Amino acid sequence: MANDGDDRTLKKAKWAPYLLSFPGMLCIYLFFVVPLVTLTKIALSIRQERGSSKVDFDWQWGNFSKAFTDFGDQFWRALLYAAIATVICVLLAYPLAYFIAFKTGRWQNLMLGLVMVPFFTSFLLRTIAWQSLFADNGPILGVARSLHVTGILDFLQITTDGKIMNTSSAVIGGLVYNFLPFALLPIYVSLEKIPTNLFDAANDLYSPFGSTFRRVIFPLSVPGVFAGTLLTFIPASGDFINAHLLGDVQKPVIGGVIQGRFLQAGDYPTAAAISLVLMLVITAAVLIYARFLGTDDLV
Amino acid sequence: MSRGRVEQIGTPSEIYDRPETIFVAGFIGSANLLPGKVSAPLKVQLAVGPTIDVPLLPSGATGSGEDVTVMLRPERLTPTVDTVAGRSVTGRIDDVIYQGSETLLIVHLEDETEVLVTIDPDHATAATKVGNQVTLTWSPDAPFVMPGRTAIVGATGTDFNEVEATMAGDLDADDDVEGGEGHPNAAPPATPEKLRNEGRRKLLIGSGVAIVAGLGAVGLSNVGSNEGGSSGTSSSSGGAAGGGLGQGDTDLNIINWTEYIDPTADGESGTIDLFSKEFNVKTNYSETWNDNNASYGTEFVAYLEGGNSTPWDIAMPTYWMAARIKSKDWLAPLPFNLIPNYVNLDEQYLNTEWDPGSKFNLPWQAGVTGIAYNIAETGRELTSVADLFAPDLKGRVGFFTEMRDTLGLVMLEMGNDPRKPTEDTINAALDRIEQAKNDGQIRRFTGNDYLQDIQNGNFAACIAWSGDIAQASNPDVKFVFPEEGAMNWFDTMVIPIGAPNGVAAAEFMNYVYDPVNAAKITSYVQYISPVKGVREELEKLGGDAAALAENPLLFPGDEEKARMYIFGDMPEALDESVTDRFTTMTGA
């Protein structure tokens, strides 16, 4: 009889988590599951009318294959641009984050602020500003010309025929610039959490800096690198602004295709299908990457 | 709803002023329904005798002899002594009912058709006495014509004893009816207590009749209160002039492109502020119409496809987008009686193929699309569209993502007429553009951002809008009116259907078509004004404004005008496939 009370507690404990998670689950349902199902439904439909969400559901798997057959190039190009930009971002962000976390002392917050300040202006405006910097008669090529390194830049494929504007380099440059803080901040946070007495311990054991970094610091910062990579790669692969404003007209990316299908051509089913494919490709890429980096317990 | 079927879904003003069926006309408020036949275009021969002029025939009813029903609302009728040809009927006053804020006249026409007239009690004179002969007249836009012949001839909802008996028993049912039919369009139903007395009375009459027939109601509340407000003689300008447009205490909401009207700056009031002050209306001016296709989706489709009305009273889509919106029946007819200044408009932008008589759109600003080049980069003068394909400019040329501008210029270059686009001429132009793109001739497809590229030398030459180059700061950049001809475009002003404050919208249109006000806008936006007389007004202003009056890009001469082409209408299917191909090509 005394067990009755315990049973009730047990029962309560069983459904309490569900009840408590209900608001969150509802949000996920409303703002993730429902839109995803709707998107999938549109992706399998035929459009009735241009520019309208009125579509007829018809198991149109052709919309998905179109993503590869008609727009395959744009897909791989977007992923390639994003991958290159992500690698450059991490390579730039890591030393900077390291410097801010360990070497700036009381200026730390100011330095972080300086990283963030440019991002208080509009993304679009900053990208348009790069048009001037990359311009044929702009400052970047001006410096390159006065240093007589245009041939070397061409050879390194940073410039094409002495131009940087409207080339792949310009797009990657724009992506690196725009997404650098997304790589930097997670790396900074993971580095900043490393207790400084680990450095002292490494010193006491006569570990040279390279060894300390390789065996202590870097492994502890891997979660930050992982998060930074994702935060850079995912938005960069869907980005179309950089490709549109800085890119080569003959080398469009998938984000631009999705935008054009939705807003210009009013072709919702194809746009929805491409969006879903992009989502799946990114998810797959992220899972593979997680396995490779051995941080799958973090995802 | 009638017999479980939806008769009409619309805003209160649409339902009241433009009922789609006779049922709706009789159900919402009181209506006088007069049967007749179409006798000539815009003329209806009434069964009671006279032939009257009507502003509009129902779509599809063009044939002579077709049965129609003319609806005249009681408050739109004015008793007078003089007959007005085309808009009056005569009859005998059989009853005068004083109702406080208005007086109700029950008039029998020559064939004993009963007609209701409401007048301002102050206007009740000796003429409006029981037994007198009276002529009922109305303003030209008052009659509304519906297809088919009515079962109820004359006034609807007139048997007060019956109605009041119904009312007494069914007050509760009435409340249910009102709230029960949730329609996205209807404002939250006001409780009957909130309505003014006579409004309530009419409302109940309407609902009462409905209940007799066992029917439901659709969004009555606004109608009731509107009706209450419009007591007075029917010819008073405000109420009668609305012509199916919403009018009310709401703000005026305008959506336009950016930098497209003079702002209030340096202590000088801009057009919007001046208008708001003069007409005592709060104007919300939004510069968020960024892109025709995209804004069409967010500002029109998103609202109207779901049966809602847009928040906008005026939108400024480019002409071809206005045509597309009109083809969806999403534009309200413009009340020209409120826009007398339309006579100042340049005929060039009126009476288009897609809107004969410009009943649904009027021009806002116009412009020319031609060629711009940076002489420091080209090293030579350019004169034609063909120059854009010159080998020495390879990789230094910009084209527009604005399809009709780019296509039109290339069509002109190929000797085709963009005013009459065909599948063949369009595809030939698309092929040529695609070839140029693949050859690396075209560096980029741009929107407004081409200005930066041409000024900093990334482009040696590009397609350009005249107004931009007129304002450009780099003296090396020049605009050419191409030898082959230039594209001419215009942005329109349209009133979306169900606009909350269409009357203020019309007043705004009238305001900006005054040459003095139009000149003020032109001196800021520097596009071609569709208003005649702007040039003279600019000259009067002196200084910089007077210099604009001499600018051929703002005031093209006859020789240029003859070579300015507006891209013609395309059938929907062609438009769709061409837009698809062009969008893919530009990689937008």
Image (cartoon, rainbow, N blue to C red):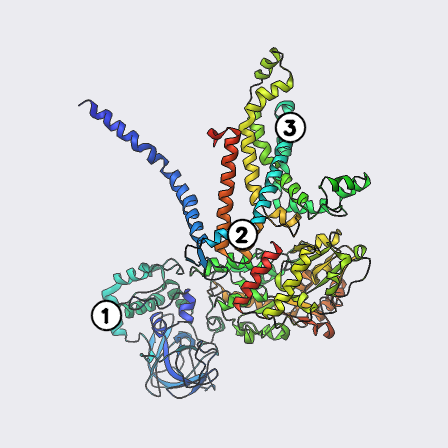
- Work out how far the residue at label 2 is from the one at label 3, CA to CA, in angstroms: 41 Å
Q: Which mark is residue A95?
A: 3
Q: Do residues under tags 2 and 3 come within 8 Å of each other at their CB atoms?
A: no
Task: Give the percent coordinates (x, y) of residue A39.
Answer: 45, 50
Q: Nearer the viewer, mark 2 or mark 1?
A: 2
Q: Is residue A72 visible?
A: yes
- Work out how far the residue at label 3 is from the one at label 1, CA to CA, in angstroms: 88 Å
Quadrant containing the N terminus of chain A in the rendered view: top left
Q: Which mark is residue B165?
A: 1
Q: Is residue A244 above or below residue A211?
A: below
Q: Is residue A278 above or below residue B565?
A: above
Give the SS element for disc 3: helix
Left or right placement of residue B364 versus residue A281 in this view = right
Do the residues indicated by labels 3 and 1 lie within the same chain of the protein?
Answer: no
Left or right placement of residue B112 versus residue B296 in this view = left
Q: Residue at x 51, y 63 (%)?
A: B313
Q: Earlier in the sequence, mark 2 or mark 3?
A: 2
Q: Do residues under tags 3 and 1 come within 8 Å of each other at their CB atoms?
A: no
Q: Residue at x 74, y 60 (%)?
A: B372
Q: Amino acid at mark 1?
A: Ala
Residue for badge 2: A69
Task: Give the percent coordinates (x, y) of residue B110.
Answer: 35, 88
- Work out how far the residue at label 2 is from the one at label 1, CA to CA, in angstroms: 72 Å
Q: Is residue B283 visible?
A: no
Q: Nearer the viewer, residue A264 or B95?
A: A264
Q: Is residue B416 above or below residue A85?
A: below
Q: Amino acid at mark 2?
A: Thr
Kindly identify which chain the residue marked by label 1 belongs to: B
Task: Give the percent coordinates (x, y) of residue B80.
Answer: 44, 83
Q: Amino acid at mark 3?
A: Pro
Kindly identify which chain the residue marked by label 3 belongs to: A
Q: Residues within 10 Å of mark 3 (few under 14, many from 20)?
A: some
